[in-house]
Image (cartoon, rainbow, N blue to C red):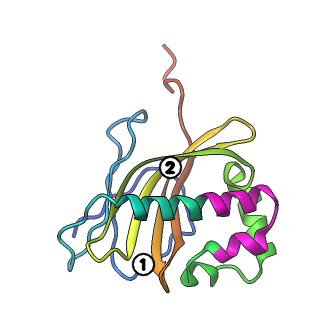
Amino acid sequence: MKKTTFGILMFAVVSCGAPVAFAAPASPHESPVTRVQDDNQKKPHSASVKERTAVGKIIRAQLDAFARDDYKTAITYQSAALKKNFATPEAFRRMMKSTYPQFARYKSVTFGRDMANAEGTRLEILATVVGKDGVKVACVYQMTLENKAWRVGGVAGGAQLRTKPSIEV
């Protein structure tokens, strides 16, 4: 299977048991299109309204916990595999605040396209997070179903969205 990635930072990306492929955006202004694919899985689909609603609630709940500086609660929304990366909620807090301030101090989040695997156990959803500083960042939340509850399995992205060309004319 061919893999491509966004040319942006990745944080806490943990495999959900199978390879995941990402498609890069054609331009910095285009939303990246993601595909959930693996060798055993040929028919990914858009998430159902129920899946999308459930995943959105989990993501917002974690972002709300970040905003309250409640990392003990925020870590409960992570998958079991992702929790292993942080010895304590304080270690997670330090990483988030220093590396991903827009997530740690978010003002709003909007969701874009999504894709789920055929089994309904993995789902990816595009998100734009706006920090309290007004900076927008794009990411893909990689969600996994554990014990009948959606958990954050990882997040790809977090780079500031460009609002103007980088080449001066």
* Residue with the most extreme left position: 42
Question: Alpha-carbon neighbours of circle 2 within 10 Å: few (<14), some, or many (≥20)?
Answer: many
Q: Is residue 157 rendered to the left or right of residue 134?
A: left
Query: Which residue position holds label 2?
Result: 127
Q: Given the image, on which type of amino acid does mark 2 rest? A: Ala
* Residue with the most extreme top position: 169
Q: Can residue 91 be seen in the rendering of this structure?
A: no
Q: Is residue 155 rendered to the left or right of residue 114?
A: right
Helix, strand or loop for disc 1: loop
Q: Quadrant of the N terminus?
A: bottom left
> Which numbered mark, 2 or 1, is in the foreground of this view?
2
Residue 113 versus residue 147 in the image, above or below: above
Residue 71 versus residue 145 in the image, above or below: above
Q: In which quarter of the view is residue 60 placed?
A: bottom right
The residue drawn where x is 38% and y is 77% is 121
Observer-nearest of 128 and 159? 128
Question: Alpha-carbon neighbours of circle 1 within 10 Å: few (<14), some, or many (≥20)?
Answer: some
Q: Main secondary structure of the magenta part?
A: helix
Q: Can residue 58 be seen in the rendering of this structure?
A: yes
**In x, y percent, where is residue 109?**
59, 46
**In x, y percent, where is residue 36?**
31, 65
The residue drawn where x is 64% and y is 44% is 108
Q: Residue 82: which numbered mark, if any?
A: none
Cα gap from disc 2 to disc 1, whole angstroms: 19 Å
Q: Given the image, on which type of amino acid does mark 1 rest? A: Cys
Query: Which residue position holds label 1?
Result: 16
Q: Earlier in the sequence, mark 2 or mark 1?
A: 1
Q: Which residues are magenta?
A: 60-76
Observer-nearest of 47 and 158? 47
Q: Is residue 61 magenta?
A: yes
The residue drawn where x is 74% and y is 72% is 73
